[in-house]
Image (spheres, rainbow, N blue to C red):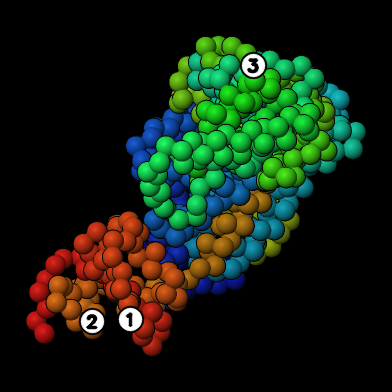
């Protein structure tokens, strides 16, 4: 426990807090630092990877900080704040998700030392916030202005991001793909942001990562339906995207129809045939020759008879298009989703020069090229030997795309390899000498905390962190602002010669977000448990309901009667067998609903026990 009673006196007099706030603050700092230490070994090009086993048994291998923390089972509320911090950095910059958490952990360690000296937590929090703004000013001073026409610098930035990934050996392939993809969907002269939804990554197991390619158009992972003998290649395609089903209609409720006469059966089949034929004729009349069918959960989206008619009319069919693909397909081809056969008209069709099903590294994909809105969207067809490699390749590509997006948003570059952190640290220490009182101590602590990035880079590369960081600090003091840690040579070199550069936005965002999170954590002085609602599920709780078959020993307060479905999930049951009044039998478990003073009470019988009444 931190003993503040014996804290040494500082300029403004030491601050002594009550025991509970000290304990809460210490608990929060320890929990957050534990999360920071967990991902610290993954930082940099020589960082280690983590193998994560998810709740459903899926295995993920990655060293991406945001991915690691997203799947980590974190219980402490302060530790969850660091998970949210990593997610915020992922949204803002896309890269630096590990750095921001490591930096936050280091700042919390520095704050803990300040607290031990008797400095008030509010003073520390506000000083850290000011120091982060000053640090970003210093970073902007050492940054280099970038022109988006400078393709070489964009490639170096993307390569630097990829070098710390599992797929780092493919940075020569991924970097040009990321740069070209972003530049195709923006207007470099005027763009201030990039919508990454315009760049779609399609994953296909088969081949190697070397087979990954950029497609100027649309790639569909679904195959063309060939069972009825329809075409697999269409030139000058007119594309229709339907959200209705090409199959016989079904009644809303499950009904059983008994046919006892073969003439009636013939009539039913004839009606079905005519119904489908009319629909297919309307599609052909509009001029459509490629039909994309959205996946349906109600009934079969398309049946064999309708496929036969479509094949006869030389219409290519691709079914099971996912709902989240609809927007991208519409933007790429210019088509509009059609929800009803009566609204299937020519003005809702999209256009492409060629749609072809091609063999690509052992798997088949549908390529749509020469689309109407060329330049608005691009697709990246990513290959990999297995799903683990494929998933990590997608995450790495996403980070590389985000790096280029950062350079579009803020057109400045800085050196990598720990160089900016050390430079800012030295400048902040000099600036701290101009301040007075507690603030000077806090600025000094903030500056020292920034050194965690070069220290971690050196540790993960197997170098001596003390010797490396001391030399790095010395070189920067002599005016070498671009001197950084060269992990390949194990020495301090001019990091620009190694082409290790990164966007300014990644570093400024990381420092600002880390300082904000530390400020929030330091200003917490108590941890309160939420009030339990009356009737909320408590072990051994028995409801007032009396029955002959058993007693409810679990319960849940709900606001409306309709929320009884949640009870099924809570009780681990599905579906109802028999219902009457306010009692429901769910697979033999009695569920009952009673109206109480604070809402509806829903209980269920977990163990069959005889009622004493």
Residue drawn at the location 32% of the way across and 56% of the way down: 574
**Closer to us: mark 3 or mark 1?**
3
Q: In this view, does 562 lie to the left or right of 604?
A: right
Across and down, in percent, residue 149 comes to 86, 25
Q: What distance separates the C-alpha of mark 2 from that of mark 3?
A: 65 Å
- Is any part of residue 186 visible from this angle? yes
Q: Name the residue under label 1.
A: 594
Q: Is mark 3 on a helix, strand or loop?
A: loop
Q: In which quarter of the image is residue 11?
A: bottom right
Labelled pair 2, 3 in contact (Cβ < 8 Å): no
Task: Identify the mark nearer the N-term, 2 or 3.
Answer: 3
Q: Is residue 428 left or right of residue 323?
A: right
Q: Mark 3 points at which residue?
A: 232
Q: Which of 591 and 555 is in front in this view?
A: 591
Q: Mark 2 points at which residue?
A: 545
Q: In which quarter of the image is the C terminus?
A: bottom left
Q: In this view, does 367 lie to the left or right of 351?
A: left
Q: What distance separates the C-alpha of mark 3 from that of mark 1?
A: 60 Å
Residue found at the very far bottom of the displayed protein: 597
In the rendered image, the vertical position of residue 274 relative to residue 183, given as above or below: below
Residue drawn at the location 61% of the way across and 36% of the way down: 274
């Amino acid at each position: 426990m931190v003993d503040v009673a014996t804290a040494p006196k500082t300029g403004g007099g030491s601050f002594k807090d009550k025991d509970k706030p000290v304990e809460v603050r210490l608990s929060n700092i320890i929990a957050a630092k534990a999360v920071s230490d967990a991902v610290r070994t993954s930082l940099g090009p020589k960082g280690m990877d983590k193998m994560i086993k998810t709740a459903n048994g899926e295995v993920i291998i990655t060293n991406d900080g945001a991915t690691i923390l997203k799947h980590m089972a974190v219980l402490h509320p302060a530790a969850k704040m660091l998970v949210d911090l990593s997610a915020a950095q992922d949204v803002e910059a896309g890269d630096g998700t590990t750095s921001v958490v490591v930096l936050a952990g280091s700042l919390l360690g520095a704050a803990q030392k300040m607290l031990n000296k008797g400095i008030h937590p509010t003073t520390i929090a506000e000083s850290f916030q000011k120091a982060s703004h000053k640090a970003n000013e210093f970073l902007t001073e050492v940054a280099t202005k970038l022109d988006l026409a400078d393709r070489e610098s964009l490639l170096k930035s993307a390569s630097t991001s990829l070098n710390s990934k599992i797929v780092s050996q493919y940075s020569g392939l991924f970097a040009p793909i990321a740069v070209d993809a972003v530049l195709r969907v923006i207007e470099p002269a005027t763009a201030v942001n990039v919508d990454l939804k315009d760049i779609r990554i399609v994953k296909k197991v088969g081949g190697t990562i070397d087979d990954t390619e950029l497609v100027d158009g649309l790639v569909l992972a679904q195959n063309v339906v060939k069972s009825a003998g329809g075409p697999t290649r269409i030139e000058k395609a007119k594309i229709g995207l339907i959200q209705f089903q090409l199959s016989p209609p079904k009644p809303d409720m499950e009904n059983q129809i008994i046919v006892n006469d073969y003439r009636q059966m013939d009539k039913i089949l004839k009606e079905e045939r005519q119904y489908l034929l009319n629909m297919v004729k309307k599609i052909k009349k509009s001029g459509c020759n490629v039909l994309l069918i959205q996946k349906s959960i109600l009934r079969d989206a398309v049946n064999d008879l309708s496929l036969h008619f479509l094949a006869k009319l030389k219409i290519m069919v691709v079914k099971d298009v996912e709902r989240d693909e609809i927007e991208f397909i519409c933007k790429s081809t210019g088509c509009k989703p059609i929800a009803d056969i009566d609204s299937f008209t020519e003005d809702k069709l999209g256009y492409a020069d060629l749609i072809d099903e091609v063999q690509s590294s052992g798997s088949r994909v549908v390529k749509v090229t020469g689309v109407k809105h060329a330049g608005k969207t691009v697709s990246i067809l990513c290959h990999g030997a297995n799903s683990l490699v494929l998933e990590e390749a997608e995450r790495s590509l996403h980070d590389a795309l985000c790096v280029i997006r950062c350079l579009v948003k803020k057109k400045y570059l800085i050196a990598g390899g720990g160089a900016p952190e050390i430079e800012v640290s030295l400048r902040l220490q000099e600036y701290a000498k101009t301040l007075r009182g507690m603030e000077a101590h806090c600025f000094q602590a903030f500056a020292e905390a920034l050194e965690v990035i070069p220290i971690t880079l050196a540790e993960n590369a197997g170098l001596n962190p003390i010797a490396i960081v001391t030399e790095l600090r010395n070189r920067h003091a002599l005016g070498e602002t671009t001197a950084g840690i060269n992990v390949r040579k194990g020495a301090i070199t001019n990091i620009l010669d190694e082409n290790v550069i990164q966007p300014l936005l990644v570093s400024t965002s990381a420092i600002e977000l880390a300082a904000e999170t530390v400020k929030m954590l330091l200003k917490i002085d108590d941890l309160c448990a939420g009030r339990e609602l009356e009737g909320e599920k408590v072990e051994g709780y028995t409801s007032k309901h009396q029955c002959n078959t058993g007693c409810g020993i679990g319960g849940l307060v709900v606001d409306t009667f309709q929320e009884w479905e949640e009870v099924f999930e809570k009780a681990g049951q599905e579906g109802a067998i028999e219902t009457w009044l306010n009692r429901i039998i769910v697979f033999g478990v009695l569920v009952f609903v009673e109206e109480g003073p604070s809402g509806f009470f829903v209980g269920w019988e977990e163990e069959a026990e005889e009622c004493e009444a």
